[in-house]
Image (tube, rainbow, N blue to C red):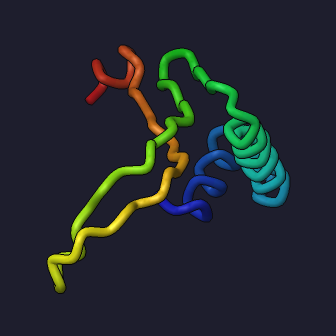
Amino acid sequence: MTKVELIAKVAADADMTKKDAEKAVNAAVEAMTGALKGGEKIAISGFGTFEVHERAEHKGRNPRTKEPITIPASRTVAFKAGKALKDVL
């Protein structure tokens, strides 16, 4: 499902215009992005949890040249599905 399809579905399900649904979806995405950027954990009951994970710097290997390289530390988002979502799937 794309963002456009999500907006159309929200508009249809909530009996609102696509323009209002787009504002709501964009506001939700921005709020979640800001929370994750600040290191907060987002738990949506019945859906799942989004959390920022820190990856430490580690050694790797260039697959072409087989040369060892250092992969820098980074942050990534992890999603863990909630029980209700798992049960539906």
Residue 47 falls left or right of residue 44 = left
Residue at the extreme bottom of the image, as rendered: 65
Where residue 15 sits, quadrant-wise, is top right
* Residue at the front extreme, as displayed: 68
Q: Identify which residue is drawn at 40% across, 61% down.
A: 71
Q: Is residue 10 above or below residue 49?
A: below
Most foreground residue, 42 or 62: 62
Q: Residue at x 67, y 38 (%)?
A: 36
In depth, the one of 7 and 84 nearer the eye is 84
Where is residue 18? Give x, y as percent: 76, 58
Q: Can residue 16 be spotted in the picture? A: no
Q: Quadrant of the C terminus?
A: top left
Residue 86 placed where, x, y %? 30, 23
Give how far across and how far down residue 69 sits, in percent. 32, 68
Which residue is depicted at the point 45% across and 43% down?
Answer: 55
Q: Is residue 15 left or right of residue 41?
A: right
Q: Nearer the viewer, residue 73 or 16?
A: 73
User: Is 83 positioned to the left or the right of 53 in the image?
Assistant: left
Residue 3, x across and y down, in percent: 59, 60
